[in-house]
Amino acid sequence: DGGITQSPKYLFRKEGQNVTLSCEQNLNHDAMYWYRQDPGQGLRLIYYSQIVNDFQKGDIAEGYSVSREKKESFPLTVTSAQKNPTAFYLCASTWETGTNTEAFFGQGTRLTVV
Amino acid sequence: RKEVEQDPGPFNVPEGATVAFNCTYSNSASQSFFWYRQDCRKEPKLLMSVYSSGNEDGRFTAQLNRASQYISLLIRDSKLSDSATYLCVVNPSNTGKLIFGQGTTLQVKP
């Protein structure tokens, strides 16, 4: 089945450690996105990529880094510079960045930093 | 002003009620619009796209008003299973960014 997979579902890390969240899609989508969601809040865009080997900062990129070496994969690294990393992280992909393009989401990763 | 704004609610309605949500967007050149549904602690899922002429899917009707820069979602005959958060999503002029509103929470009670 085609889809978008995030792993792990739950992740615990100690403060000061970098951590990488995985996002893989087999939908042959060009564009991929990372969002952060805090309790009772909407989704805020961290980074997005429209094509392999290219990505752009979203609204809250500080303390995060990404790579897009393959079309299928868009891992997100939460660095120790991110001041409040505990959140629900959602990865999404779209066929293209044109009009009426549905976004498909992974099941999310809940990161808790202690 | 936020790029996409929604009334966070919560909207508490009885079963069978009709409820409407609005969402305003700031970029007049925005091209495409969507409503997503998000259940508690789950990922968002597409409910419906919003077309210029308005569109309906069963009990759900979406409208777009470009002049006033808002979209709406109407839910008729509310069911308990409609309880969720409804997210408005805008693609501003093919920038590659999907912008989400903060969501409107609906609680349908028996």
Image: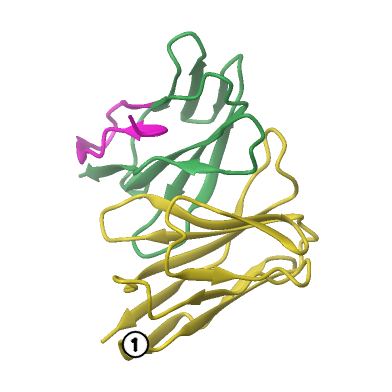
Q: Measuring 54% from the left and 70% from the top, which residue is drawn there?
A: A65
Task: Answer left or right for A35 relative to A16.
Answer: right
B102 on left or right of B52 = left
Q: Position of residue B92 (x, y in %)?
A: 57, 32
Image vertical order of residue B77 relative to residue A44, above or below: above
How many tags in the picture?
1
Assess whether residue B79 is covered by the magenta stretch.
Answer: no
Q: Colour of chain A?
A: yellow
Q: Is B28 rendered above or below residue B89? A: above
In the rendered image, residue B33, in percent from the top left (x then y), is placed at: 56, 31
Along the line of sight, which residue is nearer the eye, B15 or B10?
Answer: B10
Looking at the image, which is closer to me, B109 or A80? A80
Residue B61 location, x and y as percent?
A: 49, 25
Amino acid carrying label 1: it is Gly
Residue occupying image coordinates x 20% and y 36%:
B14
Q: Which residue is mark 1?
A: A16
Q: Which chain is green in the rendering?
A: B
Instruction: Return the residue found at the far top.
Output: B67
In the foreground, A51 or A72: A51
Q: Quadrant of the N terminus of chain A?
A: bottom right
The answer to whether residue B16 is magenta is yes
Parent chain of label 1: A
Circle 1: element type: loop
Quarter placement of the C terminus of chain A: bottom left
**Residue A16 picture quarter:** bottom left
Residue shown at the point (69%, 33%) measured from the top left: A99
Which stretch did the figure color magenta? B1-23
Q: Name the quadrant containing residue A75.
A: bottom right
For label 1, the crowd category at 10 Å Cα-Cα, with few meaning under 14, some 14 to 19 and many 20 or more, is few
